Image: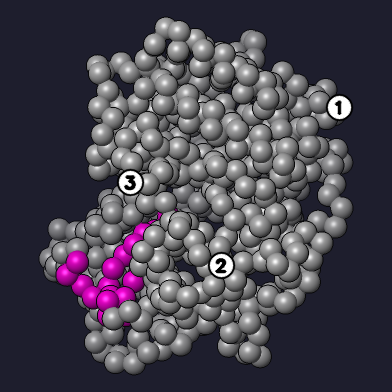
């Protein structure tokens, strides 16, 4: 079964229990276009009239794709005519395209539409057929509309370029602007922010503000992360971290609540060597209406080595990572979480290898000189397979609760009621807290136990040398994991014990063992029921099997949630009681360090390590 935005967005969320029937109806309606079932000749990719005549080579267009999100329905498209003439202000104007199921069968094939959906690596995204086709369409549109780039520069922050249809014939593609005036209207002014946070941040502790017009985009790394160059040398900042005037501009395009929440945390967090340092500038912009000087984000250092997500598996395959290096990074990360808990008096909910950056002192290029830096303090929460039960199951219910009211009475009403009557309430709940209730509603002690759980999973990724704890149906990384938690292959026995201790109360450690439910798996851009990848692609039978598997899996998960909410641990709010504290984890790591020093043991299974860094 082919992937698309609508399909994968439904399958990887618990609301699939409500979306199963309408999604099946929607897919069967696409049979005439080849979405499911045989493709008629009039729509076939073999029919010459349906083929894309040519796609530009990468770099041959005057537009560039830096990445994409929303399962490749939202692209970071960069106009090179502005970039190369030093006129590209980071206004966060993305390109939005229709769902892949709206493409013709021939286009889905020639533009890598299904294969593109899970791809995460920016270089791979840039090389996709759909990316190159979009670059060609945008260049043609600019040629035909000479004022296009001038209008682009005058758009409000966070506006959109809407591609209304994908066609083999570039001139037939309709492309329009969708200005986003409301986002600028909702921006908070700097004086108002300083007034709101006056009790936490003294006037002299605020970093200088820099106008967004003094920034120039270099690369769009993620939807909220832009690599920028600060145009002017004198911005009131003397910061050695800003090499060559490059910095990371952190912002948002849907709302500013989360980025302001992160700004406040970073400004009030006491410094720590393994936590992203406090912002050295606040970015402001004069809003289109009313002239308000709104806060749109902040600047933090650019760490060019990048995150552990791709670095870990790349170096593991080279045999470059020793147990000593892995333990050092694990201890550094543990010390960062301890600092957040004890000095920052808050929690960290977003721990994954892609939120842990590597840095070095000076120009050092050996693994031994690298250290970890924790980033991303928006406190949005984590992926499902990174959540302990006390976070995971409430997260499920929060998700389905938003859809329950749209449907008739269902078998999940009692689950929702059970959760809502027992969960702790947050007084004067903010928007950010409402989007991550499972974490914010926990007591401080239970938040620490939840942090320990995710820390154990981080240790697993480090010592197994993988990008995440298991292969993702919705995300394809340059190095997808070839092992899934709780299976161990390379982790030393001492670390296995620590990981099991940290992840206590996980269903898979329970006795008797929990029977795993068959799930949907991804092979390239196709979905199959687990263990049935031999099924013929794009048939009604395969689609029914995939949707049925997903439905059964989510029903089993929600049934486990019911059992959890009736457990003594949830009702007594004694959560994660078998897990250690962060201090106990650090003591265990130090004991392992002594053991390593004594035995000079190495984790490396592939021979002597080469610690000179190579391109990944």
* In this rendering, the label closer to the viewer, 2 or 3: 3
Comparing 538 with 398, the one in front is 398
* In this rendering, the label closer to the viewer, 3 or 1: 3
Comparing 561 with 253, the one in front is 253
Residue highlighted by disc 3: 363
**Residue 15 falls inside the magenta stretch:** no
Query: How far across and how far down the image is residue 453, in percent?
Result: 62, 28
Residue highlighted by disc 2: 281
Q: How crowded is the residue under tag 2: few (<14 C-alpha within 10 Å), some, or many (20+)?
A: many
Query: Which residues make up the magenta segment?
Result: 59-84
* In the image: residue 395, left or right of residue 542: right
CA distance separating discs 1 and 2: 45 Å
Q: Quadrant of the N terminus?
A: top left
CA distance separating discs 2 and 3: 25 Å
Q: Which mark is residue 527?
A: none
Query: How far across and how far down the image is residue 86, in percent?
Result: 33, 79
Q: Which residue is found at the position 48% from the left and 31% from the top?
A: 329
Which of the marked residues, 2 or 3, is nearer the chain's N terminus? 2
The quarter of the displayed image where residue 556 is located:
top right
Query: How far across and how far down the image is residue 495, in percent?
Result: 51, 16
Comparing 531 with 296, the one in front is 296
Identify whether 473 is placed above or below 52.
Answer: above
Proximity of marks 2 and 3: CB atoms separated by less than 8 Å: no
Query: How far across and how far down the image is residue 563, in percent?
Result: 74, 26
Residue highlighted by disc 1: 572
CA distance separating discs 3 and 1: 52 Å
Q: Which residue is found at the position 37% from the left and 51% from the top?
A: 304
Q: Quadrant of the C terminus?
A: top left
Count of picture labels: 3
Q: Secondary structure at mark 3?
A: loop
């Amino acid at each position: 079964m082919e992937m698309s935005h609508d399909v994968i967005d439904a399958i990887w969320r618990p609301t699939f229990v409500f979306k199963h029937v309408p999604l099946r109806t929607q897919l069967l309606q696409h049979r005439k276009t080849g979405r499911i079932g045989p493709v008629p000749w009039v729509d076939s990719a073999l029919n010459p009239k349906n083929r894309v005549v040519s796609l530009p080579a990468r770099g041959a267009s005057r537009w560039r794709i830096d990445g994409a999100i929303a399962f490749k329905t939202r692209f970071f498209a960069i106009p090179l005519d502005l970039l190369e003439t030093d006129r590209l202000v980071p206004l966060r104007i993305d390109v939005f395209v229709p769902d892949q199921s709206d493409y013709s069968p021939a286009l889905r094939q020639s533009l890598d539409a299904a294969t593109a959906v899970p791809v995460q690596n920016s270089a791979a995204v840039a090389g996709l057929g759909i990316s190159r086709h979009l670059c060609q369409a945008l260049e043609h549109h600019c040629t035909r509309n000479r004022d296009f780039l001038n209008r682009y520069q005058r758009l409000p922050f966070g506006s959109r370029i809407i591609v209304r249809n994908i066609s083999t014939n570039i001139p037939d593609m309709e492309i329009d602007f969708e200005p986003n005036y409301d986002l600028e209207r909702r921006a908070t002014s700097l004086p108002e922010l300083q007034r709101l946070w006056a009790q936490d941040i003294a006037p002299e502790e605020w970093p200088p503000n820099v106008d967004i017009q003094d920034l120039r985009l270099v690369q769009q790394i993620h939807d909220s992360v832009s690599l920028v160059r600060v145009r002017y040398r004198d911005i009131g900042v003397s910061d050695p971290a800003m090499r060559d005037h490059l910095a990371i501009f952190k912002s948002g395009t849907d709302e500013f609540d989360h980025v302001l929440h992160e700004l406040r945390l970073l400004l009030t967090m006491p410094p720590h060597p393994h936590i992203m340092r406090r912002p050295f500038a606040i970015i402001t912009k004069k809003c289109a209406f009313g002239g308000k000087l709104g806060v749109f984000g902040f600047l933090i250092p650019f760490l060019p080595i990048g995150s552990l997500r791709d670095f870990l598996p790349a170096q593991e395959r080279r045999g470059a990572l020793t147990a000593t290096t892995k333990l050092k990074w694990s201890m550094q990360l543990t010390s960062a979480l301890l600092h957040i808990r004890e000095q920052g008096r808050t929690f960290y909910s977003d721990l994954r290898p892609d939120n842990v950056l590597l840095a070095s002192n000076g120009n050092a290029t050996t693994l031994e000189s690298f250290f970890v830096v924790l980033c991303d303090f928006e406190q949005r929460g984590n992926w499902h397979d990174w959540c302990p039960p006390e976070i995971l199951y409430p997260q499920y219910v929060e998700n389905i609760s938003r859809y329950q009211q749209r449907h008739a009475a269902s078998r999940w009403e009692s689950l929702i009621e059970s959760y809502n009557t027992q969960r702790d309430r947050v007084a004067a709940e903010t928007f950010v807290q409402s989007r991550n209730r499972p974490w914010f509603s926990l007591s401080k002690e239970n938040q620490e136990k939840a942090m320990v759980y995710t820390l154990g999973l981080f240790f697993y990724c480090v010592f197994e040398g993988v990008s995440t704890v298991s292969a993702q149906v919705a995300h394809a990384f340059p190095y997808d994991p070839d092992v899934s938690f709780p299976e161990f292959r390379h982790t030393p026995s001492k670390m296995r014990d620590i990981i099991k201790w940290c992840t206590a109360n996980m269903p898979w450690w329970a006795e008797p063992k929990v029977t795993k439910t068959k799930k949907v798996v991804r092979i390239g851009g196709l979905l199959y029921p687990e263990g049935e990848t031999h099924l013929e692609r794009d048939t009604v039978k395969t689609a029914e099997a995939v949707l049925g598997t997903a439905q059964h899996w989510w029903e089993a998960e929600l049934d486990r949630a019911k059992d959890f909410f009736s457990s003594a641990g949830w009702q007594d709010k004694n959560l994660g009681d078998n897990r250690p504290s962060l201090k106990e984890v650090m003591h265990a790591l130090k004991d392992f360090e002594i053991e390593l020093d004594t035995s000079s043991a190495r984790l490396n299974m592939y021979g002597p390590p080469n610690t000179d860094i190579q391109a990944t």
